[in-house]
Image: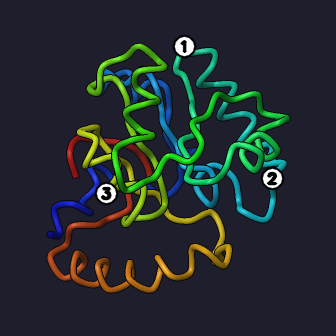
Amino acid sequence: MVALFEPTWAIKAIYNLTPAQLKREGIRAVLTDLDNTLIAWNNPDGTPQLRQWLSEMKNAGITVMVVSNNNADRIAHALAKLELPFVSRALKPLPTGINRAVRQLSLTKAEVVMVGDQLMTDIAGGNTAGVRTILVQPLIETDAWNTRINRFFERRIMKRMNKHHLIDYAEELHGKH
């Protein structure tokens, strides 16, 4: 059961990903969760660091697409200033939204990576869809009310994974963890 939640990589923040690291792994698109992965759930405007990272990805020809369980209105509002494509109501941990994103981008599953801060939705969803996954630390310590339930169960899974040294957050992407 632990394998369902085991990420391909674990890094401290999505902003640590560089085009060179992604290209070395054959990745042409980053599918990312929205809240606490790409932006803090309580700061929909993002940060200068986010805008710089998005600019680097765009200049390198790497697509960034949000795949979120949120509804389309919530995502569109959060991304209004960032102009990113998205898939709403992704139904993670089911592979539905991730598969939809891969089809929309006309890429293979080997060319995308799913990035998120939650084992139970983002990582399990990516693993179920058959794409590589990156677990990142949440941008902020607090969560929206609907995420707190997942975090309760996630702490139990994380404790088990840490016991077997399966999660070690690196500064950057390198090899299989």
Q: Residue at x 65, y 35 (%)?
A: 53
Q: Earlier in the sequence, mark 1 or mark 2?
A: 2
What percent of the width, then of the height, locates residue 136? 46, 57
Packing grade of label 2 (10 A; few <14, some 14-19, many >=20) is some
Disc 1 marks which amino acid? Answer: Gly
For mark 1, give the secondary structure: loop
Q: Is residue 116 left or right of residue 68?
A: left
**Closer to the camera, 33 or 171?**
33
For mark 2, give the secondary structure: loop
Which residue in the protein does label 3 denote? Answer: 124
**Closer to the camera, 24 or 87?**
87
**Closer to the camera, 2 or 56?**
2
Disc 2 marks which amino acid? Answer: Pro
Numbered tag placed on residue 44 in the rendering: 2
Q: Is residue 49 left or right of residue 118?
A: right
Q: Is residue 64 left or right of residue 3?
A: right
Disc 3 marks which amino acid? Answer: Ala
Numbered tag placed on residue 23 in the rendering: none
For mark 3, give the secondary structure: helix
Q: Residue at x 70, y 43 (%)?
A: 72
Numbered tag placed on residue 61 in the rendering: 1
